[in-house]
Image: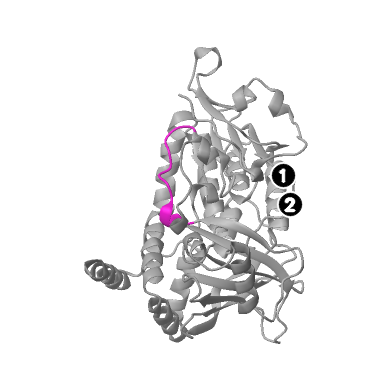
């Protein structure tokens, strides 16, 4: 059964290719991971945790370390996944940040120590550490781009079908597409990209951290310009901050001015005291989970951004990437071949299904009724438990309490009747 070929995106083009023994072997790989970010590295780590002798290869368009445009916030839930994978040292040298300040367009504000601290670690460092951990466990790495995938009969006509990559240059029992928002593997499966209303775009830069004398805090400033939209400033701990601004692609399309002018100009206006360092402004797409595709059956899987696993309330995706990658790596080992996709999809549904439904509901309501966010933040400033619930919804796997869920569902139904 062929998987349609696709043209690689510019981001997937590779330079010089690093080779390993696995590339030259006629024996199919147990797991081929396309993309060495958090989802891909977590998949390799989990596969080798379950079966140390498994043949796992990570391919990526870039060598590591490499920059990755992102907010750099690492939620504690992601570190939980890594601890379960036996990786405990990725945060060394970076102090936790246990305070977050939220400000809404209507003037509501809350700044409370979080129940669990986050870290701010540049992806150039974080991703390189994860790839190094996967390689130390036995994964091989090659710098190359993937152009096409085909599900073909196993060599010799026996056993389950396998995946041929690039016309047979590589063979694997399971292939994981962890290759980001512009996933080549996703296109090869015939899955279209998110529509503009399910796709955020953000610009990220580095700047001097604010020097207000207060404790370090992550700052999220929501704005009516392009609502739902916000700017952020996250302190790294070395005198710098990761700053940025993002909104829906559909709202950017309707804005006056060029996309670059809107993104850069709004960021500068919203964070006037932390001008961006020259050369660090870079934009990236965020495929939101409100429009995530149904994950396919078969031996080709998708994880992280490639599966549209981005929280629509906050743009957070590293926790989803680590969790989905780990579950995909597990399915590749426990149920290799055609069953892997179904097993992985069900596991992801058990872990995140209810959470994803609730964040979709809340994001849709807040996007249509901005005062809802003002009310939520005002209430959270008075009630610590509500603040913690909002953080869990935005950074982890939290769900809406039953009473609140009933009220929100009723509000959505009433709005639908108008």
Quick one: 160 or 247, which is closer to the camera?
247
Q: Is residue 294 magenta?
A: yes
Tally of numbered tags: 2
Circle 1 sits in a helix, a strand or a loop, which is it? Answer: loop
Residue 242 lies, in percent from the top left, at: 68, 68
Is 7 rendered above or below residue 367? above
Q: Local crowd at mark 1 within 10 Å, few (<14), some, or many (≥20)? A: many
Q: On residue 66, which mark appears? A: 2
Which residue, given by chain and number where applicable, does mark 1 sit on?
62
Q: Distance from label 1 to label 2 (Cα)? A: 7 Å
Quick one: 327 or 177, which is closer to the camera?
177
Is 58 rendered above or below residue 171? below
Residue 395 lies, in percent from the top left, at: 51, 65
Answer whether residue 122 is visible to the viewer in this image. Answer: yes
Residue 360 lies, in percent from the top left, at: 39, 61
Tell me whether circle 1 and circle 2 mark residues in contact (CB < 8 Å): yes
Residue name at image x 68 percent, y 53 percent? 127
Q: Local crowd at mark 2 within 10 Å, few (<14), some, or many (≥20)? A: few
| Magenta stretch secondary structure, dominant | loop
Residue name at image x 63 percent, y 31 percent? 55
Looking at the figure, which quarter contains the N terminus? top left
Q: Which residues are magenta?
A: 288-299
Answer whether residue 71 is visible to the viewer in this image. Answer: no
Residue name at image x 73 percent, y 83 percent? 211
Figure quadrant of residue 6:
top right
Q: Is residue 396 left or right of residue 123?
A: left
Residue name at image x 41 percent, y 69 percent? 367
């Amino acid at each position: 059964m062929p998987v349609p070929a696709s043209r690689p995106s510019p981001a997937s083009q590779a330079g010089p290719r690093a080779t390993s023994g696995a590339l030259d072997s006629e024996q199919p790989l147990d797991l081929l991971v396309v993309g060495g970010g958090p989802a891909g590295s977590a998949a390799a780590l989990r596969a080798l945790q379950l079966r140390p002798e498994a043949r796992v290869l990570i391919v990526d368009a870039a060598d590591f370390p490499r920059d990755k445009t992102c907010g750099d916030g690492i939620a504690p839930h992601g570190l939980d996944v890594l601890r379960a994978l036996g990786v405990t040292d990725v945060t060394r040298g970076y102090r936790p940040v246990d305070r977050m300040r939220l400000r809404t367009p209507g003037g509501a504000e809350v700044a409370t120590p979080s129940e669990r601290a986050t870290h701010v670690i540049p992806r150039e460092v974080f991703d390189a550490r994860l790839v190094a951990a996967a390689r130390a466990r036995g994964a091989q790495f090659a710098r190359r781009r993937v152009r096409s995938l085909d599900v073909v009969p196993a060599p010799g006509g026996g056993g389950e079908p396998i995946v041929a990559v690039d016309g047979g240059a590589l063979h694997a029992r399971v292939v994981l597409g962890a290759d980001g928002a512009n996933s080549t593997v996703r296109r090869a499966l015939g899955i279209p990209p998110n529509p503009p209303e399910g796709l955020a775009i953000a610009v990220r830069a580095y700047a001097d951290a604010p020097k207000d004398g207060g404790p370090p805090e992550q700052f999220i400033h929501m704005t009516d310009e392009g609502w739902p939209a916000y700017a952020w400033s996250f302190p790294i701990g070395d005198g710098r901050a990761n700053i940025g601004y993002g909104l829906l692609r559909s709202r950017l399309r309707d804005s006056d001015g060029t996309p670059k002018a809107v993104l850069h100009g709004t960021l500068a206006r919203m964070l006037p005291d932390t001008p961006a360092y020259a050369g660090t402004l870079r934009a990236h797409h965020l495929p939101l989970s409100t429009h995530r595709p149904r994950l396919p059956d078969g031996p080709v899987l998708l994880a992280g951004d490639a599966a549209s696993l981005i929280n629509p309330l906050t743009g957070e995706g590293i926790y989803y990437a680590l969790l989905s990658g780990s579950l995909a790596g597990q399915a590749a080992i426990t149920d290799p071949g055609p069953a892997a996709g179904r097993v992985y999809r069900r596991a992801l549904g058990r872990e995140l299904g209810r959470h994803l439904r609730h964040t979709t509901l809340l994001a849709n309501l807040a996007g249509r009724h901005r005062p809802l966010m003002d009310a939520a933040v005002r209430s959270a400033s008075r009630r610590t438990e509500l603040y913690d619930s909002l953080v869990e919804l935005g950074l982890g796997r939290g769900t809406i309490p039953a009473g609140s869920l009933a009220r929100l569902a009723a509000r959505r139904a009433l709005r639908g009747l108008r």
